[in-house]
Image (tube, rainbow, N blue to C red):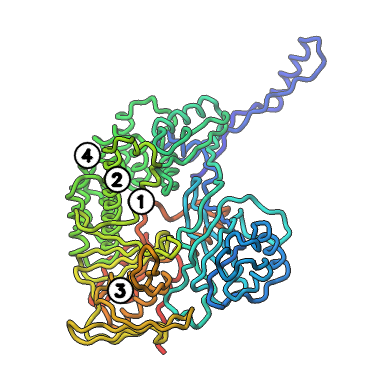
Amino acid sequence: MKVRRSAVTLGVSLVAAIAAAVAGGCESSEPVKAKEVRPLVVRDVPDLLRETIGAQSIFVGVDPTLVSGYGVVVGLRGTGGQNLPDRIAATMERQMGLNGIGRGNELRGTPLDGKSPRDLLRDPNVAVVLVTASIPPGSPQGSSFDVFVQAVNATSLEGGTLWTTELRLGLTGAFGQVQTQKLAEAHGPIFVNPFSDPSKMTRTSGRVLNGGLVTSPFKVEVRLDNESHAVARSMVSSINSRFPESVGDREPTAIGRSGASIAVRVPNAFRERPEEFLDLVRAVRVDDRTPAEEVARRYMEGFKNQPGLSNEFSLCMEALGPKALPFLRDLYDYSELGPQFGALRAGVKLGDARAAVFLKKMAKEGNASIRPRAIALLGELNAGPTIDVALREIITESDSLLERVAAYEGLAKRAEAAMLARYMQQLREREDNLAEQIPFAYLEARSQLVLPGGGLQGLSRVPIRTKAGRVKYFVDVVPFGKPMIYVTQARVPRIVLFGERAELKRPIFASAWSDRFMLDGGGAGEPIKLYYLDERTGEPTKGTVEASLSLLTEYLGRETTASDPRAGLGMTYSEVVGTLYSLQKSGATQAAFATEQDRLMSELLSAQQASRVKDRPETADDVPELTVFDTGSVRPTGLDEQPDVKPTITPIAPPKKE
């Protein structure tokens, strides 16, 4: 928004004349000072938006925040322990000593038990890494994010796990300097480029998916353009009326600080969607005394007359709440796409089941640029089983990878919601009132761990865990549609297998990791023989595997434990992804292979440039970007027909043929 300043000021001669007259009429000889008049800030915004909070204030603390720190990675395969710069080594030794390293706190029962910090840093299975991350704008305490790690004294980070590392504001400076504020911490297994051979020892960078945790978030502050206690009170009232306290909230959403500033807290319901919440707050009206129906009528005309502002008006209608629904419904079948989609978006966010009919038509018959967005909205709408049926039909009938993945994401969220509802119902039926004692966040997390399959959504989910019990990755099976393997490279690590019978082809002879992994099998009914040489131990594994891709994907990463004695190869997530990709490239399966576009590096760049960047191109409505490596018989559509969906960084390339 452009800002212009205007003020009514008095001429110098007039001020002097008044001052002289006052001085002449009083006995006091002290000069009278003219009162300073502050310029009035008036923003250059469309008339219909002038009464919104975003048009009368600026938001502070909502830029992506760059954080970093030095950490320790353990569990390497003899690729660490190289020389460190003296200042880094000295500081790391001091930090580890303060954390009890050397007295066995974290290392008890391991080969590193009892080692001094210096011995630990020289261990070939240990490395120092630089950890950097971008905390999304407005992220509240407890929210998670991905982090990037770069080795300082290792040739490969494959198989490593990052110990808990403090992340502080800004780029890590020279050691010995004053430390900045701690905002977060990070830990977890490292995910490296899965499309190269780890034996080449060149994998010196990676990321920890969902490994960052906000511990001390920046407060979001709304600064009024023109100081006014009345306006500030009105803003606080409007925000709290629109976002009242709910489950997990400990204080009001907005708290007045002065006539120039109010503090805003991201509600628990928006914990993983802080940017969406902040956009909505900007659209809330400063004064909510005008009947919502009257305001909604004005906004509806704004939709029609200024279609270029459809996104802004959509947020404004959503900010009004359910009373805007009758006016939104008049635009659900509007002839112009911008106002129609904006109205449907607001209707979905307000839970209007009537939007389902129009969204289903748009998702299946709309132009290629809008279908993935319509599918994503459809997955959010709680309008009964017809939504699940529509999403399943899209996965089965569409040739567009973007559309199929968007439909899968919608089904997965709906399956998780169904599991959560089942848990809540079971707890409510108990006599010990356990439902009131278990934190809602715990139940929410539990509902995402296992999906039994069947039901309306048809999805199944199996978590693959480490020996310590941490989830390594999820295997999701979508038993319909054309065969496809889809893997994520951000947030929750998932391998998604599409197709009624996602299996290995017979006869088969395929290899990966420079022949350290091989499959060999004949015709139908014959066993598929497996050979695997573990790079970490040098021990070979021989046996047979099923033709099912889902069972193979579980077997590759499973680690044998007392609670789960089944056999497994114990591969890392990146190794499993790389193995499946190699099998697909060698023709061992007819499934296409696609991966989520990697956005982490672009997020880090945005955080570094936050002070210079005012407009962020991505919104919560952006569809996930995909990189297609090999589609087999599937011909994707819509990938080049979306001008607003652009790659943010160079995708990971497949290995070159030797």
Quadrant (top left, top right, bottom left, bottom right) of the C terminus: bottom left
Q: Are marks 3 and 1 in contact (CB under 8 Å)?
A: no
Tell me the element at label 1.
helix
Q: Is residue 510 left or right of residue 77?
A: left
Badge 1 density bin: few <14, some 14–19, many ≥20, Cα 10 Å: some
Residue under pointer 1: 446
Residue under pointer 3: 552
Q: Residue at image x 54%, y 39%?
A: 221
User: On the image, which quarter does residue 423 sit in?
Assistant: top left
Residue under pointer 4: 330
- The answer to which of marks 3 and 4 sits earlier in the sequence is 4
User: On the image, which quarter does residue 29 sit in?
Assistant: top right
What kind of residue is marked 2? Tyr
Tell me the element at label 4.
loop
What kind of residue is marked 4? Asp
Q: Is residue 60 left or right of residue 335?
A: right
Q: Residue at image x 33%, y 46%?
A: 310
Q: Are marks 2 and 1 in contact (CB under 8 Å)?
A: yes
- The answer to which of marks 2 and 1 sits earlier in the sequence is 2
Q: Tell me if residue 51 comes above or below residue 630 in the rendering.
A: above
Residue under pointer 2: 423
Q: Residue 393, percent across and down?
A: 18, 59
The Cα atoms of the two marked residues, 2 and 1, are separated by 9 Å
Q: Residue 614, percent across and down?
A: 52, 51
The Cα atoms of the two marked residues, 1 and 4, are separated by 40 Å
Q: Residue 406, percent across and down?
A: 29, 59
Q: Are marks 4 and 2 in contact (CB under 8 Å)?
A: no
